[in-house]
Amino acid sequence: MRDVTWIRRARTLLRQSAVMLGMGGLALTPGARADLPEHYTLQLQARTNLLGNESGAYNLKPGNLLAGSLQVPVVADGRVAFRLSITPEGPNAIWWGSDAAGHHRYVLPDLGEDARASDPGLNSDGVVAFAVTGATAVASNGIYLLRSEAPEDVRIVREPLGASDWSSLALNDAGQLGFRVTFNSVGRGYIVLTPQGAGWTTTYLAKEKTLDETSPYEFLYSPALNDLGQMAGVGDLAPGGSEYYQELRVFSADGTSRLIAQSRGRDAASPIYRFASVQPALDNLGRVAFIATARVGAGPNLTTVFLWDGAELRVVAQNGQEGIREVEFFPPDMNDEGLIVFRAIDSDGRRAVWVSDGRTLRRVVSEHDIVDSDQGPARIDQETPSGPVFAGSVSISPRGDVSVVAGLAPPDNDQEEWGTAIFVAQAYFAPPADGGVDGGPGDAGCDGGACPGEEDSGTPSCDGGACPGEEDSGTPGCDGGACPGDEDSGTPSCDGGECPGGGDSGTPGCDGGTCPGDEDSGTPSCDGGECPDGEDSGTPSCDGGECPGEEDSGTSRCDGGRCPDGQDSGPVDAGGAGPNPDTGGCGCQSTSSTAFLPWLLLGLAWFAARRRTSLSSL
């Protein structure tokens, strides 16, 4: 298992603070363009199957089946977690593991026949979080927290008082919980819970009008949480009709927010006709990826993956462009390196998972691909050609690994079911031609060679830090300073003089930022749908709306009412598609710059506090 060191997280935090801590303060600066992985190798984590199928299951007993919607977060060390809606014991369960060897389950106690668990959140400290609703005893409802290493020790959080549902639940690397809360059908709000001593501090980031008459929002859709405690979400400002009156904002705990984009009902220059009712993706640099329908004039709609990169709104993928026939209505995800993953059908009608750096598209895996499995070579396939082969949304880790859920069959017989597989698609980054910095296998070290008098080891680096996207090697540096906890090698360093070919970085080399020309590696992010028979229905959810009790899986909200358990349902989109949008006008805003130092100090204080509280509170 790849370890995530505190040194790397500190360096990442400094970079985040330097870019945009506090939405009302610094103007967002676009991050450097990420390198696309050269290719992906799929590693099987688990495989579910029905009782009686000869192929059995893997890392699970047959009879454990996936939920109606599916979210499989993947963190930096490759761990994943997912929900089982049916188990041999009867109740829901949460599974987590990594490196094809994990097979841990927490089975929900008998809380009543209507009790169910939500899709889980997972962070790099090994904490798992999920919400329970529908329990016979009201006191058994709430957010369940457990350590993956000690699942018998469960803590139940019932904040805020009066909550009846905790949807779109996410757990970040600061130990914060973010979700859309519902109060007995009265209204919804975006909430962040921050560990404080033995309890939690509750912060409302946004509310619907039914909870706060001063709010502009008629309805709030599923939000996304980043590691800075900020949330991105779409809100309806007025009922829709021939036009929609919606906006996408990033909300901060200090009460400020940043307008990212709005529909053309709010801004005639915007290319967005309507936002999809799936949650957006938000990284720690303030960039946002989301799905919306683009429309010009009275033309038809074009489903589009958009990226707000800090300077402009750009098209990542769109129906009818660059080999994509149709973008599917499942949440996208992105990491701090600027890599975006999503689902779409190609021009040949094959479903696929795609990755993009915001400019170039590359496949992670496609329908009919042959992959390794516990049964030997297997094909990503379904017994019904028109049936969707992938389930739910996809997630990406800080280093670019992607969680994928897909149906399996023998390579030569798609009529034989091998169940549903949960994979981690491991990213491979080709070494640069000059032997310089690389974040993937085969790297020759940050220095392109070796420490003086030594052969190049081929590991991430010999300088006590790590190449961008890789872990710290834990050895002393050959750079004259040392990463925290390492001895000084006594030779020149990036922090005391000048790195070869570059100027003084002005920061402490390995631990404060990066040597000139290098980028920081970034931190995690995450997000779900599969029908009760174990396979995805191909629509945003099993029933054309949402499966009861599930998160927003790609549909639009109910028309003036609530769907089962307070979630959205209804048609995915209203109206038809149109010519390519003009991405130059989006109704976007940016804020003015302020001093950097206060935010940097705040970020450092936040990081120090997080290390003390994120686990001690459990």
Image (tube, rainbow, N blue to C red):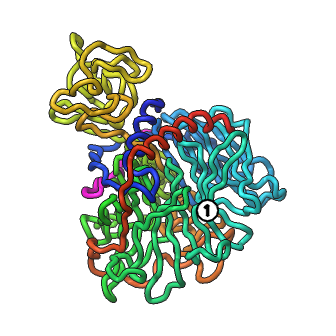
Residue 520, position in %: x, y?
Answer: 34, 39
In the image: residue 178, left or right of residue 436? right
Query: What residue lies at 65% left-to-right and 73% top-to-bottom?
Result: 212
Residue at the extreme right of the image, as rendered: 137
Residue 461: x %, y % from top left:
31, 25
Q: In which quarter of the image is residue 316?
A: bottom left
Is residue 362 magenta-colored?
A: yes
Q: Say which element carries label 1.
A: strand
Q: Nearer the viewer, residue 472 or 572?
A: 472
Percent x, y of residue 201: 66, 50
- Would you say 360 lies left or right of 263 here? left
Q: Which of 555 and 47 is in front in this view?
A: 555
Find residue 546 and report its image quarter.
bottom right
Residue 514 among those drawn in magenta: no
Q: In this view, does 366 lie to the left or right of 500?
A: right
The answer to which quarter of the image holds residue 482 is top left
Q: Look at 44% across and 19% down and name the residue there.
A: 485
Residue 178 in sight in this render: yes
Amino acid of disc 1: Arg
Residue drawn at x 63%, y 56% is 203
Using the rendered image of the protein, determine whether residue 411 is visible from the camera's viewpoint.
no
| Residue 226, image x, y percentages | 49, 51
Q: Residue at x 48, y 38 (%)?
A: 604
Work out whether 134 lies above or below 597: below
Label 1 crowding class (10 Å Cα cut-off): few <14, some 14-19, many 20+? Answer: many
Residue 442 versus residue 489 in the image, above or below = below
Q: Locate the C terminus by quadrant.
A: top right
- Left or right, 517 with respect to 117, comes to left
Q: What residue range appears in magenta?
A: 356-376
Which residue does the numbered mark 1 point to in the structure image? 180
